[in-house]
Amino acid sequence: MQQLAKKVAVSVLSLLLSGAALAEGFTLTSADIQHGGFMKKAQEFQGFGCSGANTSPQLTWSGAPNGTAAFAILAYDPDAPTGSGWWHWQVVNIPADINTLATGAGDAGKNLLPAGSMQLRNDYGAAGFGGACPPAGHGVHRYQFTIHALSKKLELPENASGALTGYMVHAHSLAFATIEALYKRD
């Protein structure tokens, strides 16, 4: 009986959370990548055997819910052969009055992010955008670019792990929208 009660509680909590997370009207679009489409060489990493331009895509979002205090962008490859995926980009505390990032905003050296935004370390070990670089011959990988509307600005250490950042973003996410782009290396 306790097992059933726990399953029901988890199911109800999941439904409540998914309802908030899938707020109607919150959308993410890009001039550089399309949902279900293959990314270009511009979004490929430079290093680890890859020779791309390592350029973060342009992103625009709209329809954020009331109470949004900031935004976060997470770019993640769930198909990386690590057992835990691969974090390509993590940006938190984008001001609530911003709704777009320019192509290349993930380049820490160009200072293109809005004031107050914070880029955290990706799984390549650098703060900023790290492009696609799946192992050669590993097949198609999915790259999930997700914008989260946050209920508050996040307090994270500069060296926060992807797991800690993801936890804090999800804990304070009012809504999210995702573009899932693809990439393959032969």
Image (cartoon, rainbow, N blue to C red):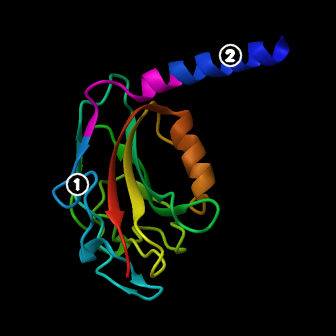
Picture layout, residue 128 above or below residue 59:
below
Q: Measured from the top left, where is residue 75 in percent x and y? A: 42, 57
Residue 27 lies in what quarter of the image? top left
Q: How crowded is mark 2: few (under 14 residues within 10 Å), some or many (20 or more)?
A: few
Q: Which SS class for mark 2?
A: helix
Q: Is 19 colored magenta in this rendering?
A: yes
Q: As drawn, which residue projects farthest toward the left? A: 31
Question: What residue is at 31 percent from the left and 82 percent from the top?
Answer: 52
Q: What residue sits 42% from the left and 76% below the top?
A: 133
Q: Residue 34 carries which label?
A: 1
> Is the residue marked by circle 1 packed among few (<14), some (14-19), or many (20+) residues within 10 Å?
some
Q: Which of 171 and 6 is in front in this view?
A: 6
Total marks drawn?
2
Which residue is located at x 51 percent, y 57 percent? 78
Where is 32 relative to 26, above or below?
below
| Above-or-below relation of 159 to 9 | below
Type of amino acid at the residue the image marks with label 2: Ala
Q: Which amino acid does label 1 sit on?
A: Gln
Residue 46 among magenta residues = no
Q: Tell me residue 91's x, y (percent).
A: 42, 54
The part of the chain drawn in magenta is 17-27
Please indicate whether residue 54 sits to the left or right of residue 93 in the image.
Answer: left
Quadrant the N terminus occupies:
top right
Q: Position of residue 11 (x, y in %)?
A: 62, 20
Q: Which of 136 and 53 is in front in this view?
A: 136
Q: In which quarter of the image is the C terminus?
A: bottom left
Q: What residue is disc 2 on?
A: 9
